[in-house]
Image (cartoon, coloured by chain):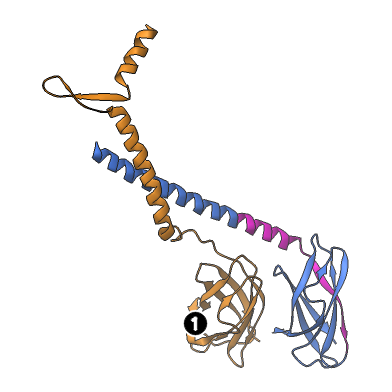
Chain colours: A blue, B orange
Amino acid sequence: MVASLILLLIVTTLGTFLYSYTLTSTGLQQDYLRSQVELESERAGERFRIVSVLWLGGDRLNVTILNYGLIDIAIVDVYIDGVRVSTYYGGRGEEIYTSELGWICFDSPIPIEADSTYEITIVSERGVTHVYLWEN
Amino acid sequence: MVLKSIIYIKSRYTLIARWIDMLGRYERSGISTFVAVLLLMVLAVSAGAVIYAYTMGYLGGLGGTRTPGTLSLDTAIANVTSNEIVAYVRNIGKGSLDIDKIYVEDKLVPDNKISFSGDGIIEEGEVETITINCTGTVTLTSGITYEVKIVCTDGTHLTFSVKGS
């Protein structure tokens, strides 16, 4: 009888362990999938583009962005010809509501010259990018 | 019929049982085997729960319970002059990500050829600049597209293409 009880103890312990482990594991997977679907649907709802680029002299630029998507956005980073902008004067991380215009002002990390073409990449907080070829 | 059955069950499963010695005297009183088994089962299950709770502290976090994060590419450039690829990678998922290995055209880039703007760990919402020196792995040529794969320690990976310029 003691042997049976020991076996019962082992089986119960292992069973509980296995049950809890699989429950935790599948729960985490479900949470991950749910968050991924949510993130991807939000990313898919983002639509924005640069409508104008204003050269303020020197290396300073002011970019106007139109949010024509289904969700509010915030521009968190700008790249000029693949180089990340490090100095911002305003507009970074600020919410741009749907069907509205927003702006972001910064210093270009590469010198801005007249009659030149630059590739401006703007990135939203959800990682959606928009590339614009700007002819100065 | 019903009354007889109840009486039988009551006498068989009574809580108190007596041990009788060889002379037919009551030696000492105890509990019935049914109750004893029941008690032992409760003890076994309780002990199992205690052992489980104890071991889960050590084993609970082992393997399979961590989900990967999400990486996103902001932009990347492949400089043929310096033979380097510079990629700006953003962590848009939950939790921090630790970059482990990088492949260019399915070839593993040695760790000493990779440099980060930080420590290679990307926190939530942060961007890491990764500079990959391709010398010894591939020779970058202008106009050719290269496939880069970044793999993190938790299995998160990001694959992107970048054109040499």
Q: Amino acid at mark 1?
A: Val
Classify residue B121 as left or right of residue B49.
right
Q: Name the residue nearer the viewer: A39 or A121.
A: A39
Q: The residue marked by circle 1 belongs to what chain?
A: B
Q: Name the residue nearer the viewer: B165 or B14.
A: B14
Q: Name the spot of residue A5 as percent of width and height, x first.
A: 29, 39
Q: Is residue A108 magenta?
A: no
Give the vertical position of B159 relative to B77 (above or below): above
Give the vertical position of B11 relative to A94 (above or below): above
Classify residue B16 as left or right of residue B20.
right
Extent of the magenta region: A33-56
Q: Residue furthest left?
A: B23
Count of numbered circles in the view:
1
Q: Name the spot of residue B6 as percent of width and height, x first.
A: 37, 13
Q: Name the residue nearer the viewer: B72 or B134.
A: B72
The image quadrant that residue B73 belongs to is bottom right
Q: Which residue matches tag 1? A: B109
Identify the residue at horizontal 85%, vertical 91% (top origin): A115
Q: Is residue A35 magenta?
A: yes
Classify residue A18 as left or right of residue B76.
left
Q: Name the spot of residue A20 as percent of width and height, x first.
A: 46, 49
Q: Name the spot of residue B30 as percent of width and height, x first.
A: 26, 29
Give the vertical position of A47 relative to B144 (above or below): above
Give the vertical position of A99 relative to A5 (above or below): below
Image quadrant containing the C terminus of chain A = bottom right
